[in-house]
Amino acid sequence: MPSPVSLFFSDFTDERGRVDYYWSRLRSLDVPVPRTTFVALEPTDDGYRWDTDAILAFMDDNDLHRAFVRTQFKAATVRLREGSFVSRPNSETVDRTVESLLNQNDEQGWPHGGGLVVRE
């Protein structure tokens, strides 16, 4: 009997799918890319820890009133606006958005890759 065929075209946990894996190569090309920063995401006993101030500093340094956040592997999986769009540059909005992002991806079984990617 032949082996079952996988319907997945890729291994979603493959390190080559992480933004920080391909970012330096992408930036070296002559193509427009959004202003981007990386923020560490550390697992804790009761969830995750991230540097809200680093996200706010990126927004301030780039004069952004809004930003887009995703994990190394994926943006929010179900409610994109709630989990990936930072609508205001304040700590409550940043934290609420990141918490929604991580909860949505956890519910779908997506890895986080140890970091957040913040873009204009």
Image: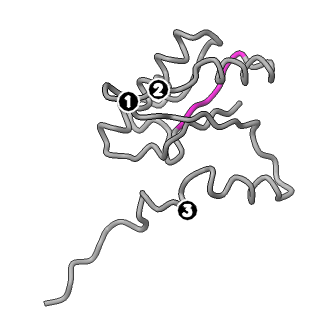
Farthest residue to the right: give it. Answer: 30
Badge 2 density bin: few <14, some 14–19, many ≥20, Cα 10 Å: few
Quarter of the rendering containing residue 48: top left
| SS state under label 1 | strand
Q: Residue 39 in the image: x percent, y percent?
A: 61, 33
Farthest residue to the front: give it. Answer: 45
Quarter of the rendering containing residue 3: bottom left
Q: Residue 83 in the image: x percent, y percent?
A: 46, 27
> Could you tell me which quadrant the C terminus lies in?
top right
Q: Which residues are magenta?
A: 65-70
Cα distance in 3D space between marks 3 and 1? 25 Å
- The residue that mark 1 highlights is 44
- The residue that mark 2 highlights is 49
Cα distance in 3D space between marks 2 and 3? 24 Å
Badge 3 density bin: few <14, some 14–19, many ≥20, Cα 10 Å: few
Cα distance in 3D space between marks 2 and 1? 7 Å
- The residue that mark 3 highlights is 16
Relative placement, left or right, of 74 versus 105 is: right
**Cβ atoms at labels 3 and 1 below 8 Å apart:** no
Residue drawn at 64 percent across, 23 percent down: 55
